Image (cartoon, rainbow, N blue to C red):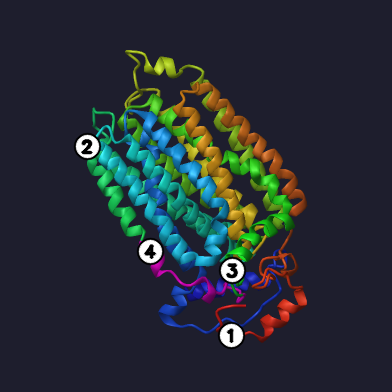
Amino acid sequence: MADLDTKDRKDSSSDHIDQGPTHNDTVAPERHGFAKLYYHPLAQVIMLGFVLFMGPGMFNALNGLGAGGQVDSETSANANAAVYATFAFTAFFAGSINNKLGSRLTLFLGSLGYSLYIASYLVMEYHSNAGGFVIAAGVILGICAGLLWTAHGSLIMAYPTEQKKGWYISICWAIFNMGAVIGAATSLGQNINSTSNHVGAGTYIGFLVLTLIGSTLPLFMADPKKMYRVDGTRILIARNPTWKAEFFSIFLALWTDPWIALLLPMFWASNWFYTWQFNNYNAALFDIGGRSVNSFVYWLSQIVGSILIGLLLDTKGLKRRTRAFLGWGILLALVFIVHIWAYFYQRDYSRESVAAEGFQLINIHDSSYPAHIWLYIFCGLMDSMWQTAAYWMIGSMSNDPAKLAHFAGLYKSIQSAGGAVAWRLDALKTPYMNLFISTWVLLTVGLLFALPMLIVRVKEHTGLAEEIMVRMDEHGRVRDVAEVEEKQADAPTKGDQV
């Protein structure tokens, strides 16, 4: 880790294109041995990735099988609609909750809902009439997920220097998707030769154990107030002791940086496509063996996609704005490649044809299977690149964890609202082709709206003058830059607050 420190500090000082904020408030304390490793931002991001690995990763592995591993997709679709509906509501306010309770406690509370949700599918394995319990668990999970993902977004965009945001985001996303890969591999081993077309109790038990372990990890993470970036700049945490001031800060963040509104269509589309991919493609066309293999390669491709786009977005020698436009162009190309390809499959089947007696599900041994699985691989690449780029775009607007918590909450709120609508439309038996076309259109519109934001708002670095939340005092008053810099200069080196 010492070499990593040296390398990152050198990068930070020598890269004239992308210098971070110049407000170096206090000198980072000297740490040695385990403490130096433990308090390294990358080490904390890796720990954060494992929180996602064992919570949302297991959730994704289950959903990636299509219909939550069941035969009847209606219960799964309604449960997912419940998840995303409460997720959307909670996430909007979760930034304030995160800033008030702290990221570790918010992550811990958020991770608990995943165990309950997995347990509900285990109950349904033995009691087929337990669909109501699955949906109720989905409601609770949505509340918890809003907390977890908002806390994650705040930390993942605040811990790295501006030169390393793409890399840190991609590392965390890759570890997160390793959870889905391992979960899918477990399911694959158990179900590759199954003739029942749904997963067994052993799959749910394995997922449940992992989510329970994952819920304890946030308790072992470092307090963000004691963290410094690798260039020595402090992770500034605003102090807002009253809930009134904290909730006011939501609207202050949005009011003072309205360009975030241009990313809302991109946020809305970012979970919409799961419905078609998981239920209308994977669950509709493949037997359980094929679904398991597809799920495994889907999440594996996500790891590759997130790392590739992360490296691109941090490429040395290119200005930050240039990297932003390159990332945007790659996303646009992928959207059209995936959906033009998928259209030639979607036009040949419908809900009615899939439900008809004698419809032949695709098996991994069928001659048509390789082309179909390659499409699913590209779907995974598109998903991970979309999510990583979205976080990078938000992170390019600020380095303040309090403000980023609100932006992350907004992202997950709008994203989940879109997901809730898409899953509900699937539960209402909306034609496959309609959901497919809506997916294509929404992704394209999301990118078109994001382009003006990239043109106008993305700068080479973000300074203290643009960090409204850091400059807000405990009464909600926004202090001027000189006042904040003077207070930072007088702050003790190892103090917890600014």
- What element does badge 3 sit on? loop
Q: Are marks 4 and 3 in contact (CB under 8 Å)?
A: no
User: Local crowd at mark 4 within 10 Å, few (<14), some, or many (≥20)?
Assistant: some
In terms of sequence position, does the residue under pointer 4 or pointer 2 come before the other?
2
Q: Which residue is mark 3?
A: 242
Front residue (pair 301, 190): 190
User: Local crowd at mark 2 within 10 Å, few (<14), some, or many (≥20)?
Assistant: few
In terms of sequence position, does the residue under pointer 4 or pointer 3 come before the other?
4
Magenta region, main secondary structure: loop
Relative placement, left or right, of 287 versus 393 is left
In terms of sequence position, does the residue under pointer 3 or pointer 1 come before the other?
3
Q: Are marks 2 and 1 in contact (CB under 8 Å)?
A: no
Q: Are marks 4 and 2 in contact (CB under 8 Å)?
A: no
Q: Point out the stretch of residues depicted in magenta.
A: 216-233
> What's the mark number on residue 126?
2
Mark-to-mark CA distance, 2 and 1: 58 Å
Q: Are marks 4 and 1 in contact (CB under 8 Å)?
A: no
- What's the residue at 48%, 48% (across, down)? 304
Whether residue 274 is visible to the viewer of this picture, yes or no, is yes
Mark-to-mark CA distance, 4 and 3: 28 Å
Mark-to-mark CA distance, 3 and 1: 26 Å
Whether residue 61 is visible to the viewer of this picture, yes or no, is no
In terms of sequence position, does the residue under pointer 2 or pointer 3 come before the other?
2
Q: Amino acid at mark 3?
A: Thr
Q: Residue 204: image x %, image y %? A: 28, 44
